[in-house]
C-alpha cells in the first residue's frame, strides 16, 4: 500500500506536543503547573480508554491531571456540584467531562456549567459563540480544531476550496464548518454540510476539494464519491463485526480507506489520523487556560 499520500496525525500531534511542552516548562519556571481535571461518570469501556490515554499524555508533557470517577447512578445535581467545585478551585485550569453521559444527565446542562475559562473541550455556549464570531480568545472544540491543524500543517490550502463535511453534530460537523468558513488565510472555504436528510450527498462529495467525514457510519465514503486528488479526512470511529479479529470485531472509520486511498490526493489513516490530534489540541487548550489564569 502506497503511503506517500498519507497525512500522519501522530507525527503532527508530536509537533504540537513539543510546542506545548515548551509552554509547560515556561509556566513551571514561574512555579505554575497546568492542571487538567477529568470527570467520568460510569464505566463505559471506550470512555475509560480515552481518559487513560489523555492522562498518560498529560503526564508526558508535564501537565498534572486527576480523574474523578462517579458511579452510573450519580444524579445530575451531584455532577453539577462537583463541576462547580472544580470551577472554584484556582489550582484547576481545565475541566473535561467525558462523554457519553448516562441518559438521565443532560449533556448540554453539564457543558454549560463548566466555567468557559476552564472549558478546554470548547463546548460551553460562550466558547461556541466566540467560535461562530471568529473570535480568537475562546477555546475551540478539540477534534475540529485538530482537523484544522492537520490541514494547515500538511500544507492543504482551504482558501476558496469546496469543502464537504459529512455530519452535522455539535462536536465535529457544526464547529468544523464554523472554523473553515471564517475570513482567515487558513479558512475562506466554501462549506457544504451533508447529513442523513441530505439529497445528492454523493454528488456533493464528487465536486469537493476536501471531504471531512464525521457521520458515524462505517465506511460510508466510497471510491465513487471522491474526485481524483481530493483531500479526505476521516473522523469516524465505528466498530464492525469481523470474525477474523481476536475480539470478533474491529474499528473502522467513516471512509472506505482501501478503496479511497488510491484516488485521494491526501488522506488520513484511521487510526493514526485525527485521534492523536484531538488529544494534542486538548492539552494545548489546557496550557492556554493556565497561561490566561495566571497572567
Image (spheres, grey):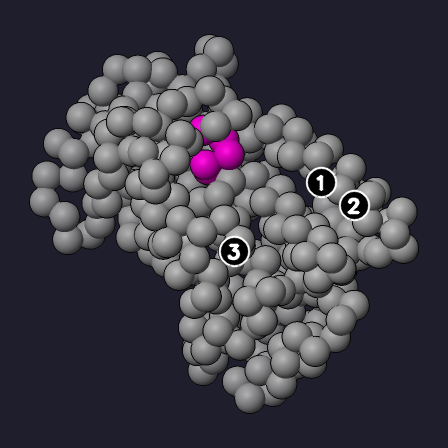
Frontmost of labels 2 and 3 is 3
Q: What crowding class fits label 2: few (fewer than 14 Cα within 10 Å), some (14-19), or many (20 or more)?
A: many
249 or 140: nearer the viewer: 140
Q: Earlier in the sequence, mark 2 or mark 3?
A: 2
User: Relative to 221, is 279 on the left or the right?
Assistant: right
Q: Tell me whether circle 2 and circle 3 mark residues in contact (CB < 8 Å).
A: no
Residue 205 in percent (x, y) is at: 21, 31
Q: Is residue 120 visible?
A: yes
Q: CA distance from mark 1 to mark 2?
A: 6 Å
Q: Secondary structure at mark 1?
A: helix
Farthest residue toward the left? 199
In the picture, which quadrant includes the C terminus?
bottom right
268 or 95: nearer the viewer: 95
What span is in magenta? 147-151
Q: CA distance from mark 1 to mark 3?
A: 18 Å
Residue at which label 3 appears: 138
Q: What crowding class fits label 3: few (fewer than 14 Cα within 10 Å), some (14-19), or many (20 or more)?
A: many
Residue 215 in percent (x, y) is at: 32, 47
Q: Tell me whether circle 1 and circle 2 mark residues in contact (CB < 8 Å).
A: yes
Residue 68 in percent (x, y) is at: 71, 72
User: Relative to 205, is 139 on the left or the right?
Assistant: right
Q: Earlier in the sequence, mark 1 or mark 3?
A: 1
Residue at which label 2 appears: 24
Amino acid at each position: 500500500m502506497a503511503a506517500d499520500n498519507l497525512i500522519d496525525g501522530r507525527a503532527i500531534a508530536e509537533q504540537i506536543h513539543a510546542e506545548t511542552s515548551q509552554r509547560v516548562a515556561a509556566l513551571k519556571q514561574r512555579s505554575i503547573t497546568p492542571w487538567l481535571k477529568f470527570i467520568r461518570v460510569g464505566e463505559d469501556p471506550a470512555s475509560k480508554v480515552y481518559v487513560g490515554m489523555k492522562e498518560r499524555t498529560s503526564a508526558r508533557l508535564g501537565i498534572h491531571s486527576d480523574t474523578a470517577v462517579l458511579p452510573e447512578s450519580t444524579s445530575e445535581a451531584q455532577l453539577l456540584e462537583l463541576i462547580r467545585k472544580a470551577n472554584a478551585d484556582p489550582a484547576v485550569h481545565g475541566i473535561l467531562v467525558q462523554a457519553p453521559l448516562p441518559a438521565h444527565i443532560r449533556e448540554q446542562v453539564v457543558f454549560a456549567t463548566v466555567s468557559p475559562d476552564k472549558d478546554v473541550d470548547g463546548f460551553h455556549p460562550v466558547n461556541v459563540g466566540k467560535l461562530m464570531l471568529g473570535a480568537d480568545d475562546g477555546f475551540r472544540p478539540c477534534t475540529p480544531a485538530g482537523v484544522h491543524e492537520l490541514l494547515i500543517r500538511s500544507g492543504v490550502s482551504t482558501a476558496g476550496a469546496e469543502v464537504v463535511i459529512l455530519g452535522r453534530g455539535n462536536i465535529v460537523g457544526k464547529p468544523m464548518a464554523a472554523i473553515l468558513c471564517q475570513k482567515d488565510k487558513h479558512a475562506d472555504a466554501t462549506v457544504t454540510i451533508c447529513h442523513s436528510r441530505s439529497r445528492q450527498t454523493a454528488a456533493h462529495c464528487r465536486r469537493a476539494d476536501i471531504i471531512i467525514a464525521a457521520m458515524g457510519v462505517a465506511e460510508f465514503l466510497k471510491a465513487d464519491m471522491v474526485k481524483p486528488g481530493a483531500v479526505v479526512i476521516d473522523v469516524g470511529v465505528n466498530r464492525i463485526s469481523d470474525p477474523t479479529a481476536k475480539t470478533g470485531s474491529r474499528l473502522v472509520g467513516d471512509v472506505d480507506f482501501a478503496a479511497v486511498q488510491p484516488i485521494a490526493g491526501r488522506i488520513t489513516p484511521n487510526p493514526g489520523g485525527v485521534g492523536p490530534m484531538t488529544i494534542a489540541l486538548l492539552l494545548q487548550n489546557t496550557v492556554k487556560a493556565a497561561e490566561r489564569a495566571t497572567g
